[in-house]
């Protein structure tokens, strides 16, 4: 009795179904269709190249065994990869070693697959890059902290997929410009090469899309969509950690994009070698291109960044306020911009003059740790040095006026620039009580109101202490 392709494949499926998990069977074997059987050669149709590659990597031994069981040792298996409603491509197996050779290269049509970013029912012809247009190279301020990253980014933008920087991995702490630089590359490509499909996404959104694709039994369409992207930008890849399924799918997307000469740009809060909970094969691929870090900007770069932001937003800060902010916000460009916006908002809503006092109030809310770093010992040393007196005199019982003024000023600065209690401050000045601290602060404020030179002295010491914290 001559066997037809349906009978042969149904028999194979029964064997396969008893050998693997139910979900794996449903995902990877139910979509397969037998399309031809001729001379012990069974041809099966699979949805896309990713599907074929997955079968090759995970189930080639099982497929070989079941086909030979049905058709004999001479049996061969051929693949037909579905590209669209009326087109296909054949791949073949020699029936002995389980390896597959492709007869031709495979291309994907942008509109042939599900776009995971599109709301069902709304047609979208081109890929929406999901880029923030405000992130450009023009407003990405260059300094020693980011020079290599910016240069590499510009090289990639000019020739995506055509440099040795593939993938380009940008890492650094929060708020140093990783997302800005990565999206600047995408925006530059969109501006200069409208035929390129650029896509930016976070690892969180990527993972959520995979979950939805699995729920909708559309994982193959999801993968095919991503394999069509020319420049893929994925933010915060450290969040791939311990997500086995997501890593597995991203591994195949990465391989396809890289082998096809498409550009991959990744950001992370640490270098690839320090990524935990990540498959070694992924980490090794992250190292194929260029890994570059963004460091905390120096003072001059911080000031340039703030002035660029001021110019863009039409905000005018006095020079001493700019210096104060940049001395105190050291490690996070995002906080630098947040402080600027808060100062402008406070001045506008409360009808206040933009000065160092206002800046100090705003900075305290952003950088509480900066205030804690400023110790009472440091304040005492700074004031004693200014008045050229021994530090221990500030704690002594003496009532000599120069020492009393220096002690009262030290208490005033301790209350203004730290979060220490009045009791703690008093104890640091020879065991004095909180009422003495209150009296000292009032006395200093009265002197500032009536003595301009003394007020300038206080403001100068405040600035020095703030810069040192």
Image: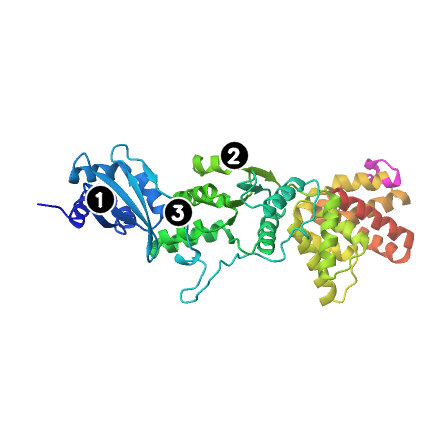
Q: Compared with residue 278, is residue 198 higher up or lower down, i.e. above or below?
A: below
Residue 218 location, x and y as percent?
Answer: 35, 55
Mark 1 or 2, which is nearer the eye? 1
Q: Compared with residue 456, is residue 39 higher up or lower down, i.e. above or below?
A: above
Q: In screen coordinates, is 345 left or right of 113?
A: right
Q: Which residue is mark 1?
A: 42
Which residue appears at 82% of the width and 37% of the height? 391
Determine the image quadrant of residue 192.
bottom right
Residue 2 location, x and y as percent?
Answer: 11, 46
Q: Kindly give the residue lying farthest to the left in the view shown.
A: 1
Between residue 370 and residue 213, name the one nearer to us.
213
Between residue 287 and residue 347, name the one nearer to us.
287
Determine the image quadrant of residue 75.
top left
Q: Which residue is mark 2?
A: 273
| Residue 458 visible | yes
Is residue 393 one of those drawn in magenta? yes
Q: Which residue is mark 3?
A: 106
Mark 2 vs mark 3: which is more N-terminal?
3
Q: In screen coordinates, is 242 left or right of 375?
A: left
Category of crowding for the residue at label 1, using alpha-carbon neighbours closer than 10 angstroms: few (below 14), some (14–19), many (at least 20): many
Q: What number is the disc on residue 317? A: none
| Residue 437 visible | no
Under tag 1, what secondary structure? strand
Category of crowding for the residue at label 2, using alpha-carbon neighbours closer than 10 angstroms: few (below 14), some (14–19), many (at least 20): few
Q: Please report the bounds of the magenta region as a residue range.
A: 386-396
Category of crowding for the residue at label 3, using alpha-carbon neighbours closer than 10 angstroms: few (below 14), some (14–19), many (at least 20): few
Is residue 279 one of those drawn in magenta? no
Mark 1 vs mark 3: which is more N-terminal?
1
Q: Name the colour scheme.
A: rainbow
């Amino acid at each position: 009795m001559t066997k037809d392709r349906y009978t042969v494949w149904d028999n194979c499926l029964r064997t396969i179904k008893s050998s693997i998990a139910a979900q794996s069977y449903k995902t990877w074997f139910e979509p397969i269709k037998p399309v031809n059987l001729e001379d012990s050669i069974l041809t099966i149709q699979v949805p896309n190249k990713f599907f074929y590659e997955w079968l090759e990597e995970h189930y080639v031994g099982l497929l070989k065994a079941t086909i030979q069981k049905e058709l004999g040792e001479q049996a061969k298996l051929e693949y037909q990869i579905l590209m669209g409603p009326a087109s296909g491509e054949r791949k073949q197996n020699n029936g002995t070693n389980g390896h597959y050779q492709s007869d031709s290269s495979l291309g994907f049509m942008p509109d042939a697959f599900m776009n995971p970013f599109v709301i069902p029912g709304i047609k979208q012809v081109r890929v929406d890059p999901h880029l923030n247009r405000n992130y450009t190279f023009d407003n990405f301020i260059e300094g020693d902290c980011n020079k290599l990253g910016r240069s590499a980014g510009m090289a990639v933008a000019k020739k995506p997929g055509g440099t040795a920087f593939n993938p380009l991995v940008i890492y650094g702490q929060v708020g140093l410009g990783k997302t800005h630089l990565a999206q600047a590359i995408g925006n530059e490509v969109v501006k200069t090469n409208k035929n390129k499909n650029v896509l930016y996404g976070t690892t969180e959104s990527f993972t959520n899309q995979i979950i939805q694709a699995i729920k909708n039994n559309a994982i193959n369409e999801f993968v095919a969509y991503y394999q069509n992207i020319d420049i893929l930008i994925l933010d915060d890849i450290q969040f791939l950690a311990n997500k086995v399924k997501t890593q597995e799918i991203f591994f195949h997307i990465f391989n396809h994009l890289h082998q096809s000469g498409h550009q991959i740009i990744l950001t992370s809060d640490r270098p690839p070698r320090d990524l935990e909970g990540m498959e070694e094969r992924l980490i090794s691929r992250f190292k194929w291109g260029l890994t570059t870090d963004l460091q905390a900007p120096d003072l001059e770069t911080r000031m340039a960044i703030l002035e660029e932001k001021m110019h863009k937003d039409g905000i005018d800060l006095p020079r001493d306020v700019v210096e104060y902010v940049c001395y105190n916000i050291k490690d996070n460009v995002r906080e630098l911009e947040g402080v600027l916006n808060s100062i402008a908002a406070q001045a506008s809503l409360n009808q206040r003059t933009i000065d160092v006092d206002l800046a100090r109030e705003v900075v305290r809310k952003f950088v509480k740790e900066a205030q804690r770093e400023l110790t009472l010992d440091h304040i005492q040393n700074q004031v004693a040095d200014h008045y050229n007196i021994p530090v221990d005199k500030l704690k002594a019982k003496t009532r000599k006026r120069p020492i009393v003024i220096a002690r009262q000023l030290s208490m005033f600065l301790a209350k203004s620039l730290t979060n220490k209690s009045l009791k703690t401050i008093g104890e640091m000045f020879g065991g004095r009580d909180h009422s003495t601290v209150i009296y000292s602060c009032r006395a200093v404020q009265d002197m500032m109101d009536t003595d301009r030179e003394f007020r300038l002295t206080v403001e100068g010491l405040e600035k020095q202490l703030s810069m040192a914290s």
